[in-house]
Image: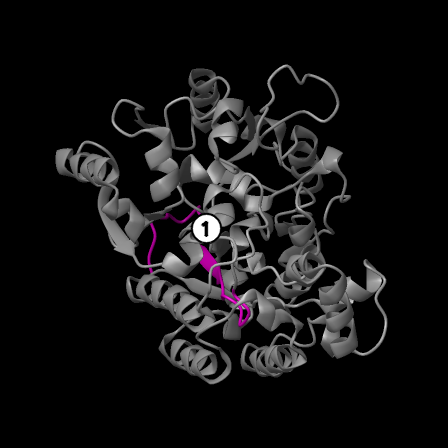
Amino acid sequence: MTTSHNANTPFAIEANFDGLVGPTHNYAGLSFGNVASTSNATAISNPKSAALQGLTKMKALHDMGFVQGVLPPHERPHVKTLRDVFGFTGSDGEILAKAWQINPNYVLASSSASPMWTANAGTVSPSGDTADGKVHFTPANLCAMFHRSIEHEVTGRALAATFANEKHFTHHPALPGVAHFGDEGAANHTRFCGDYGHRGVEFFVYGRHAFGNNHLQPTRFPARQTFEASSAIARFHGLSDDHVVYAQQNPDLIDAGVFHNDVIAVGNANVMFHYENAFANTPDVIGEIRRKMDGIADFTAIEVPQSRVSVDDVIKSYLFNSQLLRLPENGDMMLILPIEAEETIPVRDYLYDLIGKGNTPIKQVKFFDLRQSMRNGGGPACLRLRVALTEAELAATNPKSLLDDTGFTKLAAWVEKHYRDRLSADDFCDPQLLSEVRTALDDLTQLLDLGPIYDFQR
């Protein structure tokens, strides 16, 4: 693994930590505002295929020379939620049966597959940006949706087990789980930089102000991220105002189904790939990023015009929910896209024109079959949390969480052993499924050396 650096720059890389799709991957259609999620509600899922698709993408990035990590799935169904929040009592099996009898949606909301999208796991600020020189993590409260609001405690434990060395890593609790501090994590956060080990510019995108200034608001779908949440995280992480940019997402695009910034823009290093009018005032946003990047690196913004790709095709293809990666060997950029982007003709034609002209940093595109995730409303970028790490920080990261050939083989075998290849909504009231899930997760915590991160283990 190499990256451009000099004697005064800490050796650093950007690692991708993908969420491993869980053994109860399902389509409950719980995410209002996520068109793909709601349109596939109640469809039969294939958890085994979903997990293997995700692992295949992880292995491909590892084979290309990228540092690739794994974050564990959550326990689902989450009986603790049915007990502590809904008030059901009895054995685990009795709780599932009672909740299902009264309202199956109680069980489905406690069984969401959404933790696999680790772009929502939290916000990460690299040590080059923070006042204390440590990597800072804040798990997202995800309070806009009940089924996601129950994730942050286990997510926090998983992050703390993966990045456990207090000399290098600082872990914050999630922000208060109220609408004023709605936080969706890295799906609304990007970092621009030159070298990953140098100071960069952190870019926070929000949907609304919680305390006034709300003249721009979506009217159809909710604006999940607040300015107050983004700015609070920046302060907790010890970021300098001179190296932070805040931008409001275009409310018309939220109403069209662009529920997170990572559905309309993606960035890495000194490049942003975005849609026309992605933000409330896109030219001003680009100008501010460019000014704050002055002296760090030349900033390039690649804008996709609406005349080439419609909003509907952007959402259908998840063009911007791609991974924008800087190739280790030469610094060129590559887009990792879902196969739906290749199948959407205007998107495919635009991408081939983009790389064919050769006048932007993006030189390659690669397509992956992630249909199981895509049907639930998440593409390649949803599945990963980016963490810039120096050589010392990488060495302090849990080695079992870093994917290599042996780890891939073991995880694939674990999936083959424990996952079903067919799952319907009715399966969630069966206590046998819960038993299978817990057996699988017990094995996984040993495989990844994570300790007792799950509620049933504590």
Q: In the rendered view, does 219 fall on the left or right side of 263? A: right
Secondary element type, mark 1? loop
- Residue type at mark 1: give it: Gly
In this figure, which residue is indicated by the disc labeled 1? 378
Look at the picture and state if 441 lies above or below 337.
Answer: below
37 inside magenta stretch:
no
Q: Position of residue 290 (x, y in %)?
A: 42, 24
Front-most of residues 88 and 115: 88
Residue drawn at x 47%, y 82% is 414
One can see residue 454 in this view:
yes
- Left or right of 444? Residue 287 is left
Residue located at (36% from left, 58% from top): 370
Q: Is residue 24 magenta?
A: yes
Residue closer to the observer: 50 or 172: 50
- The span shown in magenta is 1-25
Which residue is rendered at x = 69% and y = 49% of the image? 146
